[in-house]
Image (spheres, grey):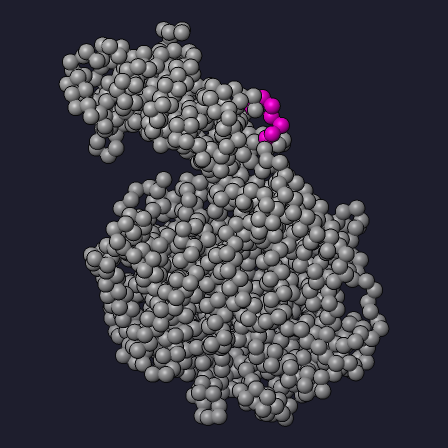
Amino acid sequence: MHRRTFLLSSAGAALSAFAPATGVLAADEPADFHIAGILAFSGAYGIIGKDMRQGVELAIADRGGKVLGKPIRVSWEDDETKPQPAVQKATRLLAGGAQMMFGAVGSASTLALQGLADQRKIPLLVTISADDKITRPNGSRYTFRTSNTLGMEIRMCIEFAKVKGLKKIYGVTADYQATRDGWELFAAEAKKAGIAIVGNDYAPLGNRDYSVIVDKMAKSDADGIAVIVTGNDAVTFLKQSGQVGLNKSKTQFGPVLQDETLAAAVGPAAVGVYSGVRYHFTVDNPANKKFVEAYRAKYNEWPSSFAGEAYDGISWWLDVVESTKSWDRETWVDAFAKSTRENSLEGKKVMRGCDHQAAQVGLWGVVTEGQAPLPPLTMKITDVFDASKLFDVCS
Amino acid sequence: MSAGNVSLQCENIQVAFGGLKAVAGVSRSFQSGRIYGLIGPNGAGKTTLMNALSGHATLAAGQVILNGRDITKLSVHARTRAGLGRSFQITKIFSGMTVLENLKLAAFAHRYRVQPFWMPAGRFAEIRQDAEKVLAQIGLERLAHAPAENLSHGDQRALEVGLALLSDPSVLLLDEPLAGVGHERLEQALELIRRIVAGRTVLLIEHNMDVVMQISDEIVVMVQGQLLGSGTPAEIRANPAVRAAYLGNDE
Amino acid sequence: MSTIVIGLSLSFLLFLLAAGLTLIFGMLGVINFAHGALYMLGAYVCYQIVHWTGSFWIGLAFAPLVVAALGAAMEVVTLRPVYNRDHIYQLLLTFGFILVIEESVRLIWGLDYKQVPTPDLFSQPIALFGSQIPSYRLFIIGFGALVSVLLFLLLDRSKLGMVIRAASSDSEMAQTLGVDVAKVRTAVFALGSGLAALGGVVAAPLVPIELGMGFSVIIDCFVVVIIGGLGNIKGAIFAALLLGMARAAGFTYAPEWVELITFVLLIVTLMTRPSGLFSRKGRAA
Amino acid sequence: MSMLRLDQILMAAAVAAMIVFAMVSTSEESLNLISLILIWGLLAIGFDLIFGMAGMLSFGHAAMFGAGGYALALLAPQFGFLPSLLVAAVAGAALAFLLSVFALRVSGLFFSLLTLSLAQLVYILASTKLRAFTGGLDGIPGVLRPALFGVDFYNNRNYFYFLVVVFVIGVAIMALLRISPFGSALKAVQANDVRAEQIGYNVQRLRQCAFMISGAYAGVSGALLASLMFYVSPQMLHWSTSGDVLIMTLLGGKGTLLGPVLGVAVFEVLKEELSQFTEHWYGVLGIVFILCTIFLPNGIAGLFAVLGRGRKGASK
């Protein structure tokens, strides 16, 4: 038994040196293209799962429900925003012969699925989790992400701070590895750009009271408030900073602070808050227009960033699979690693071979009051940052 | 009956609850092979003194010496191992188990400091013998396999004495062993206590005057947390101070 | 100075959250894990009322009543047959409640966020001690103080309170004295559920209203109830003050350690004075 | 002590049937589900040693469960699977000892609340402060499977057989423990701890030993779960895990050897199957809990007892 070498940090890649797990790779044609959809339909991210499912189902309908001449079948499973159910249900679907995995929502669940993807040699398509660890240089061979990374969104914050001319920043960061790294990157880049950091507080994840931190911010001479928290914490912070009218005197912004869903949760206090935007239905290109009309026709609501990114990612993947004319998963992986999507919903996206992350433009917007038929609180895209500014070059 | 050597020695025992001194300096020695009846009005501190001896009440001051060894600091189970058994005013036995199983538990606790876990309990023959020996002593053979909680009050009191016996105590503290025992079973219960003495020291608390006079070799009278005096049943019955302080208001 | 005012608002919000649990836990001896779910339900019902009537105050008045009625119904149907059994079975029931309540909220209101705006009366900050204090925080302090006084008077001073305490300390005895213990228990559970909902309504303008909001509250409630002492309203007030101030200080100087402060405080209490720092009884056996 | 009663035999038969079903059935789905049941079954058996036998309701078993998982995840790459599994057991027992040093100072309800808070403290430390070791909330992916006698345990069926062996050993040890003098001592402590102390049992040490054995079982099952899923995360340490094992044991019937395993089986099958029939499986599961609590006082084991017309349930 040769010793299995195994590095904790890049768990994925090093796992390849052992006998293939499940039988010989089926080269003959299976009955259908079975997708294992592992999303959160309950728990903190339940709302996101629903939108992503709608995006994928629309993408499949748009191509007549077929790829490589076979019907596409999606099994949706609820991971309750927790890693254990995610892996448990994914294992079941892979055992049932799924060709690929789609999901998950929370980074913890996605990282858990990544281990499974590498071990079982099944492609995993990620279209929302932003943790940079998911697409590391020579990381997991079978994982691809077509949506934003947190690192890219942090860089957008810097670009915005420069454009806006902010001089002093006070930050609040969730005490979670991905957001802590995000703050370190932001502080380093800010120093380079000559922007002063007045202070930063690490608040516990899922914190329910930011009033003391908001009070400190209000009393500081900072002109910009960097809010590096995600999901519910963003809503809690903005509701409580709204009660002090922090937005009047200071500019609040964050990598993934607001979108239509979160703005609806915050209410009027969200107006004037700046945030990175992963996808927006007002992006002006033919592909996006067609998608938005089809989405509104089918679901009678505007597509959220979750639905848009899901639609965009799965369409791109299925097109590449179609182009390979093969059922061999390794061929799909090699083809997708080199592919470019000219007409994605956000313009051009280039899949980077070194870390399987799609390089793409960065959308940045501000929450404004929308006139009907737009939602009452909607994002207005104010800047589109070029990919070169947002991604480090990698071989 | 071998009398003479001191088995239990109390040195200025004091127990206080908040300001109140329930036991205010009791010093006395007890000899093996004798039955001592501890009497006194309600609230005299009899049960508190017994709790102090058995480790269920912490001492404010004083010492308890058992067979020449200071056990004041020992925990309850260590005192039992040192040879001090007791029964409780409110019967405490193991419900959900048979009489024999109750006794076997006490036998295991006595024989093993670290309870064996490598063999089923049924395989320990010497334990079964110990239990059956005491079962016979307390006269409950016919109830061996009856659930302990279904026993009559008198039988439960007998079982409790049996449990104490299994740790082969040199000093046995009995807190109202005859309480609730019906008139017809009284003689049988008294006979049981006489039989189990066999060289041990027995200190029992009893409110029934003619019973305690009948069973005890020596009577110790306690009032307001202090010993008033002691003597043979006859002496105590005649002692004016005891009569005034205690027997005068006998219910 | 402003930190103290914010600390006070933290304290009273914690008290409002925990008051219902102290009542049910203390008076009925039921470890009510569904307390968080009732808190969430209160927020959702308040959202619905505000959605219909546009007034936060009508929501504040009626949401607790609605949830109290639901609590009473739940208690009669499920808890009543289980009181005579080991406490653990009541606990298992409350686990069942969590799942049922969460599922029914999902059915009625769906998955998306709901939003209750800060009432206009308290939406503007007030300059106090050199910084901008949200007036809604002052409302929480005032309202929390009012509720704590009312609860204290109800339980410790009123005849009804005496009956409740009698029923909880010795139900057989109370029964013989003519107290309909079953009704009293239902009333206590209903009052506890109503208080949980009240906590939800007051917290609605501060936090996102979503299915998971109840789950994050349970541990905080237990901390306040344990430190304060079971069923001890006065104790709960002091415990909430202690915890609120500790957190305010924590957020000021070491925000990362705030969660740990909560647990160290709890563990020290459980080890030194398990029956609560402020309860009359000494160490529990 | 008590000869093997009919209901215990029936329950053993039910568990054996479940294992055989997994062996014969070709569907990986049931293989995975029954592997999960065996792992959680070990945790429940260990939990029932102190809950059913010694009458101590611990709400902190998630801490030992997670400790075992992390021990394996961190040590297996360097020291191999079996030594790490052993360390996982020791880690579970050590953490149980640490918890008991604090928790055994109090009794009853406060014991449960103290174990809950201690375990939640471990959860917060693992997800924030000890991030360098535990990978924080993202946990550690890529936990290894065993590597013995050249068998490929990455094949789920082989790993299932490994689990069956560990499970049977665990059940055998626990069966012996329960009918040994140590087991009777624990029953004595639950029946009347004052009398147990009085007849000479060192009650505190007995409770501590039981808690440590229970912790070792939790450590092992935590490690096996991490290995099954190739992943360990603080979610295993979360108090809801302690809640789950309590529910499973109560559903199955506390104080019986195999009752908790049946409780685990019903709980997991319900969770798995319900989610396929209805999107609202969460609510249905809640209703099932409520009904079981009211109408199944001694849990599923109680049913077997009636079925076997043996004595009504093991202990009240």
A39 relative to C219 in the view: left or right: right
Q: Nearer the viewer, residue B9 or A278?
A: B9
Q: Position of residue B61 (x, y in %)?
A: 28, 24
Residue B126 within the segment the image draws in magenta: yes
Q: Residue at x 82, y 75 (%)?
A: A29
A234 relative to A305 in the view: left or right: left
Where, by quadrant of the figure, is residue C71 drawn? bottom left
Which residues, given as a range, are shown in magenta? B121-127
Q: Residue at x 36, y 12 (%)?
A: B34
* Image quadrant where one finds the C terminus of chain C: top left
Dominant SS of magenta comes to helix
Q: Position of residue C270 (x, y in %)?
A: 38, 46
Q: Residue furthest right?
A: A28
* Image quadrant where one finds the N terminus of chain C: bottom left
Q: Position of residue A336 (x, y in %)?
A: 73, 77
Q: Residue at x 46, y 63 (%)?
A: C97
Q: Nearer the viewer, residue B245 or C234?
A: B245
User: Against B135, is C177 above or below?
Assistant: below
Q: Is residue C221 visible?
A: yes
User: Against D258, is C39 above or below?
Assistant: below
Q: Residue at x 70, y 52 (%)?
A: D17
Count of numbered labels shown in the rendering: 0
Q: Is residue D223 visible?
A: no
